[in-house]
Amino acid sequence: MTEKELNPNIDRSQKVIFIRGLKKAFDDNVILRGVDMDLYKGENLVVLGRSGTGKSVLIKIISGLLTADAGEVNVLGEDVCCITPKEMDKLRLKIGFSFQNSALYDSMTVKENLEFPLVRHAKDMTQAERDKLIDVVLEAVGLRNAINQMPSELSGGQRKRIGIARTLILRPDIMLYDEPTAGLDPITCIEINNLINEVQRRFNTSSIIITHDLTCARAVGDRLVMLLDGEFKREGTFEEVFATDDERVQAFYNYNFSE
Ligand SMILES: Nc1ncnc2c1ncn2[C@@H]1O[C@H](COP(=O)(O)OP(=O)(O)OP(=O)(O)O)[C@@H](O)[C@H]1O
């Protein structure tokens, strides 16, 4: 299994996300019981946890799609619990969300899919500037040749790449990857892991990667955290997180490698 090299660009003096005592329940269903989390500038943080432990709820709270019941959630210096909807919209533009299903528009070409966020959010940009940005992100994801193709003509891995390119086009400070390797074959998984690291290097983004895939976690994570019973109970490098007798952590590990 590929191990990630120590990343010299992480700036531990700058926290782009700072969370303390985050709680969230849906009626009697208590999901987050007091989560503390930091994301440093330039860091890839992997969030592990079994299905239903609240990983997606966590990133929805970070991106303002859900509100917290209690605790502090600070993203790029803004307290997301207390900002106005207009300020939240502005903050959201600095957060790139890479969804599980890539969420491309099937009736648009790759170029039109990439243009869409620019037309909406960068209205003053000239067509030449848009074309340049489209070229930069397509080159970054290695799919310049796909510019005029329809999403239906692309493989799952290629669609995932275009989805990441579309997220990158607004140059977000933070990338949120939700299950980036779900449903892909092992070789394509390795390519997506490499791309996540390449995006980190090239664009100096700080990222949260939610995954069940421990090969992905090990390849992309500078640091890992594991959600257990509504809190981050394990934290550290891949080796540190799994160096425990805790049966729940061991079961997670064994399940991954017995599939
Ligand atoms: N809007 C909502 N209303 C009510 N319950 C919700 C809502 N969103 C999430 N939940 C509940 O919160 C719990 C955690 O869901 P979440 O999607 O965060 O899990 P997850 O850890 O991301 O799981 P998976 O790995 O399967 O995606 C689940 O029990 C889910 O039913």
Image (spheres, rainbow, N blue to C red):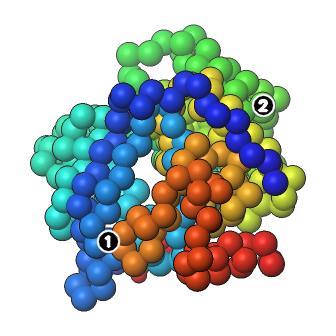
Residue 252 in view, yes or no: yes
Q: Nearer the viewer, residue 225 or 79?
A: 225
Q: Nearer the viewer, residue 193 or 127?
A: 193
Q: Is residue 164 left or right of residue 140?
A: left
Residue 36 in the image, given as x and y percentages of width and height: 32, 57
Q: Nearer the viewer, mark 1 or mark 2?
A: 1
Residue 173 in view, yes or no: no
Residue 47 in the image, given as x and y percentages of width and height: 51, 58
- The residue that appears at 78% across and 72% down in the rendered structure is 257
Residue placed furthest toward the right: 187
The answer to the question of whether label 1 and label 2 lie on touching residues, with beta carbons closer than 8 A, is no
Residue 160 in the image, given as x and y percentages of width and height: 69, 49
Q: Quadrant of the C terminus?
A: bottom right
Name the kind of residue labelled 2 in the image: Gly
- The residue that appears at 35% across and 35% down in the rendered structure is 15
Mark 1 element type: strand
Q: Nearer the viewer, residue 42 or 81?
A: 42
Find disc 2 in the rendering and name its residue: 142
Q: Quadrant of ligand 1?
A: bottom left
Q: Is residue 143 left or right of residue 179?
A: right
Is the residue marked 1 within 8 Å of ligand 1, measured from its CB?
no
Mark 2 element type: loop
Real-space CA distance between mark 1 and mark 2, rounded to the nearest whole angstrom: 38 Å
- The residue that appears at 54% across and 48% down in the rendered structure is 223
* 144, above or below 66, in the image: above
* 247, above or below 101, in the image: below
Q: How many marks?
A: 2
Q: Residues within 10 Å of mark 2 (few under 14, many from 20)?
A: some
Residue 65 in the image, given as x and y percentages of width and height: 32, 57
Find disc 1 in the rendering and name its residue: 32
